[in-house]
Amino acid sequence: MFSFRGISSAAFAVGAARHEVEGERAYLMATPEKALADKLITERNGAPTSRSGLRRYLIEELRIEPEALANLDQDRLARIAQVTGSRAVRTLVKIVCRSGVTKECAMDEAVRAMLSRYRVVSADDAVNAVREAVQQVALLGLWRARLFEHAAFYGGSALRILHGLDRFSEDLDFTLLAPQPDLTLSRFVESMAEEVRGFGFDVAVSEREKASDSRIRSAFLKANTRQLLMDFEAGRALAGIVPANQALRVKLEVDTDPPSGFDTEVRYVLQPIPFAVRVCALPDLLAGKVHAVLFRPWKTRVKGRDWFDLVWYAANHPDLRLSHLEQRMRQTGDWSGPQELTWPDLQRLSEGAVNRLDVNRARDEVRPFVRRPEALDVWSQAFFHDVIGRLRPTEGG
């Protein structure tokens, strides 16, 4: 008795071997790696994706001996995982790699490709590179959970990952497309955590209890920084200078009551596998950044990253949707009354913000997140007056 299940054409040939019989036709047969991967992919009830769950499934249900797992071809499995995008197969790669066959299997091919883009010469470089890899995998998990049908990406990480901002960012910020005060993050957080762990990142996940008066929902990914550096081949010399208890943290925040008047677009991320991300349009992202520069409640502290981003906007995308900035200001109580916000109003507010700026504190705050600190040497109040002057309102905005 035979049964047949569908599988993508791209995945069909990966891992198949051609055999010939003398006097007969040639035929294709699955290698052990492909046969096991196909079983995981087509499992009716879904194969487990956690390491512990999948290991039990392999040994107890499929009755595969641990020694047989250690003999599987890791490179072939990694190729199958990359083509199919299967979480279960990626977890299988990790299980096989942890069998101690080769050190190179400490991370799968997709993670190696992501980390190979970075020039790592310091512990800060290594931490930023690993954090950004975690962020991209987390975005993949959120895409699988269909978050981008309800929300758009914004903030520094959106600029970094989707538009090439030349600084690293810590958090993943999203805004709902329409207000939904009763939104819960559990489904999205679970998918994000499953994705990140499936790629071999050993992280803990927690969702913050919502404050009664807050429109923001938050969750956190946390990991031991030193252990991640060791796991992902950053090198013992770099890992050794990181405090043993230092935590690497990625915060997920969703604005459930967003201000109106913004546009979105869909952009694509190609690693670890191709997927789509809905993101706020650049004139609206700039409006949000200007709002942060003018009114972010950091008490006596200065967030230099906001000012760094403002320089990037002025140099690359200076168009600002003034109407969306006004909506943000009205929501936070920073603009009231019947009159509309005008460009001279914004210039006046910006001039005051620059005059109050502690440039040295701003420079010190952003320094760990940039790869070329010498770009900060020119910072001064005169410099930022010039930067603000380069912004321009969009048509109708």
Image (cartoon, rainbow, N blue to C red):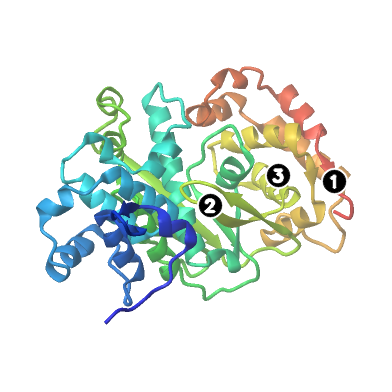
**Relative to residue 10, is residue 190 drawn left or right?**
left
Of badges 3 and 2, the one in the foreground is 2
Q: Quadrant of residue 58?
A: bottom left
Q: Earlier in the sequence, mark 1 or mark 2?
A: 2
Q: Which residue is mark 1?
A: 393
User: Is residue 261 visible to the viewer in this orientation of the structure?
Assistant: yes
Residues at marks 3 and 2, CA–CA distance in whole angstroms? 31 Å
Q: Amino acid at mark 3?
A: Val
Q: Quadrant of residue 346?
A: top right
Of badges 1 and 2, the one in the foreground is 2
**Relative to residue 91, is residue 71 drawn left or right?**
left
10 Å crowding of disc 1: few (<14), some (14-19), many (20+): some
10 Å crowding of disc 2: few (<14), some (14-19), many (20+): few
What is the total number of numbered labels drawn onto the structure image? 3
Q: Which residue is mark 3?
A: 290
On the image, the x and y values in percent for residue 152 come to 61, 59
Q: Earlier in the sequence, mark 3 or mark 2?
A: 2
Q: Amino acid at mark 1?
A: Pro
Q: Which residue is mark 2?
A: 274
Element type at mark 3:
helix
Q: Nearer the viewer, residue 277 or 321?
A: 277
Element type at mark 1:
strand
Residue positioned 57% across, 67% down in the render: 256
Residue positioned 59% across, 64% down in the render: 151
Of badges 3 and 1, the one in the foreground is 1
Image quadrant where one finds the N terminus: bottom left
**Relative to residue 153, is residue 95 drawn left or right?**
left
- Does 238 appear above or below 83? above
- Does 266 appear above or below 210? above
